[in-house]
Structures are given as structure tokens and as C-alpha cells.
Amino acid sequence: MKERFEPITNRCGDIIEWFMASPDIPDNMELQFKIRLAVEEAVANVVDYAYEGGQGWLEAETITSADGSVLSLVIRDAGVPFNPLEKEDPNLSLSVEERGVGGLGIFLCKQLMDSVGYVYQDGCNVLTMTKTVGASAKPSPEVEG
């Protein structure tokens, strides 16, 4: 499924709810919680920082693997080029004051999802987060004895 939101000013909730309403989201409360939290962090970053005044667009997409075992969440925007993965993971042993501002959201995404990838392609930031959502739906081969 794919949807484009434009403009994105004050649309964070709409975008998150669109992701969570996708039929690709698993019917598992624990996975839904992790996915929602990662989506909230990633979407909030785009809405808050990608465009001056939020006057841009965001494309949201959900994709499942052929066997249904892996869910990919893709967020595209044409805002300021920014690779959130270049920021070093925060040192959680430091106090909030010592740690400085920023970096916790993408760190959280990396902890909640199986993988988080970024590319700048065709003038767009593309963030892809994946999560294993179930065992392979393919039947296992029969063992002949």
C-alpha cells in the first residue's frame, strides 16, 4: 500500500494512523506496539525537520515479502537531504544533560525494528524499516524416508 500526504503540517497523527491501518500490519499487539513507536519517531522527524514550515510531502508505503514474513515500512520525502543513520548512537550511560540533544528517535527505531536503511535517491530521502512479522508462509518440504 502507498499513500502520499501533502502538505504534512499537523499531519503526524494521520500518517501514523494510515501506517497502522494497513492490512500489512500484523495482528500481534507486541509487534504493533514496536512498529507504531518506530513509525511515530520516523514520521515525526520528517514532519518536524524535513521542510521549512512543513510545506512538503511525505509518501508512506508498506510492503510485505512474498511469503508474508517480513514487513517493510518506507517513508519518502523531498525535504533537506538528511541521513539519520550517520548520527552516532547515544551513550545511554550519560545523563540527559551530558548526552546532548537528538539521536534518540532513530536509535529507538533501530532497537525496535530488525533493520533501518537510508538512501538519498532521485532527490528524495528514503527511509526503510523492516521487521520480521511471522514465520515463512511457505510450506516446508516433505522429508522422504
Image (cartoon, grey):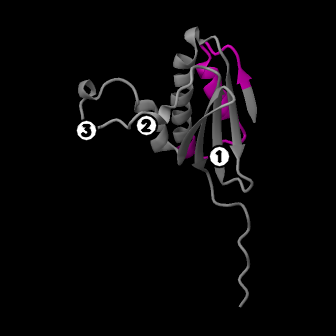
* Residue lying furthest bottom: 145
Magenta residues (range) = 4-32
In the image, which disc is placed on residue 132? none
- Asked whether 103 or 1 is in front, the reply is 103
Is residue 28 visible to us here? yes
* Cβ atoms at labels 1 and 3 below 8 Å apart: no
Q: Position of residue 143 (x, y in %)?
A: 71, 83
Whether residue 74 sits left or right of residue 104 in the image: it is: right
Q: Amino acid at mark 3?
A: Ser
How far apart marks 3 and 2 lie (CA) works out to 14 Å
- Whether label 1 touches label 2, CB < 8 Å: no
Q: Secondary structure at mark 2?
A: helix
Whole-Å distance between the Cαs marked 1 and 2?
19 Å
Report the disc number at residue 71: 1
Q: Quadrant of residue 121?
A: top right
User: Of tags 1 and 2, which is closer to the observer?
Assistant: 2
Horizontally, is 57 left or right of 32 in the view?
right
Q: CA distance from mark 1 to mark 3?
A: 32 Å
State which quarter of the image contains the N terminus. Answer: top right
Residue type at numbered disc 2 = Phe
Query: Residue 139 lies in what quarter of the image?
Result: bottom right
Task: Give the residue drawn at x 65%, y 46%.
Answer: 71
Label of residue 107 in the image: 2
The residue shown at (53%, 48%) is: 114
**Callout 3: few (<14), some (14-19), or many (20+) C-alpha neighbours within 10 Å?**
few
In the rendered image, which residue does mark 3 sit on? 93
**Is 107 drawn above or below residue 50 in the view shown?**
below
The spot of residue 90 in percent (x, y) is 34, 35
Element marked by disc 3: loop
